[in-house]
Amino acid sequence: MKINVTLQFLLCFCFMASVSFGQTDKGSFLLGGSIGFAHNNTTTYITNSGSTETRSFTIDAQPSISYFIIDRLAVGLITPYSYSKIKSKYAGSESTSTDKSYSVGPAVRYYFPLGSEWAIFPEASYSYGWTWNNDLTNKTRVFQGGVGLVYFLNQSVGVEGRAFYRNAHTNYEDVPGAYRGRSSDEPNFNFSLGVQIYFAGKANP
């Protein structure tokens, strides 16, 4: 069974509600991020060797900030972080491990307006960082790409949903034994709902 709930969270400034500007105009900023929770129960059956049961709980956070270099095109920085606690049971024995990862890299999105209150935006990001498993440190690269739909509640706040593909590529350089020098890919598809805050350096005339 898998439960995956993704919520967008933002740092709000109380004065933003009174600011009036074009959300996606050149010179505007976009402040936001995401928080995700995932719980997985999996059973792997091994021929003539019984089965392995694995339970994991993961928290993902993806704060970001972007700047509109031209109208509708926002370029910025994303800093994904995740924490996982994993419990495994095999042949009557149990083990527990923790995984943490942090990366940083560029992100870009472009808005296609649908009237005055709606817009569609494709979005992509690529970040580079590290994973920690107990005392081991390895390098990771994360690619995300997808499309979203945003509804502007007012000049400063947009409610959006995103469907996107994510792949984390990890190089095992600090792992002893046969896995040293190998790599892994973890592709998956996700959907997120949330809120973003838009603010600009200049008001509309």
Image (tube, rainbow, N blue to C red):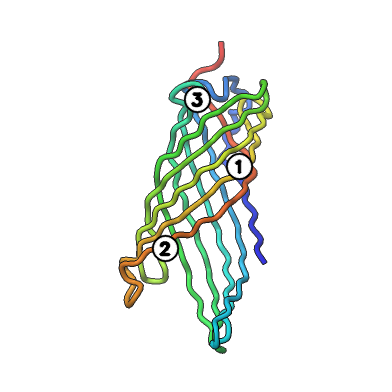
Residue at image coords 63%, 31%: 157
Q: Residues within 10 Å of mark 2 (few under 14, many from 20)?
A: few
Q: Nearer the viewer, mark 2 or mark 1?
A: 2
Q: Look at mark 1 in the image and give the residue it sits on.
A: 162
Q: Is residue 140 left or right of residue 19?
A: left
* Quadrant of the rendered image containing residue 139: bottom left
Residue type (three-letter) at the residue carrying disc 2: Ser
Q: CA distance from mark 1 to mark 3?
A: 21 Å
Q: Secondary structure at mark 1?
A: strand
Asked whether the residues under the numbered discs 2 and 3 touch, taking CB atoms below 8 Å apart as contact, a structural biologist would say no
Q: Position of residue 77 (x, y in %)?
A: 43, 39
Q: Is residue 205 left or right of residue 5?
A: left
Q: Position of residue 99 (x, y in %)?
A: 46, 66
Residue at image coords 59%, 28%: 16
Q: Nearer the viewer, mark 1 or mark 3?
A: 1
Q: CA distance from mark 2 to mark 1?
A: 26 Å
Res. 28 mark = 3
Query: Relative to 145, is 198 above or below?
Result: above
Q: Earlier in the sequence, mark 2 or mark 1?
A: 1
Q: Look at mark 2 in the image and give the residue it sits on.
A: 184
Q: Nearer the viewer, residue 177 or 63?
A: 177
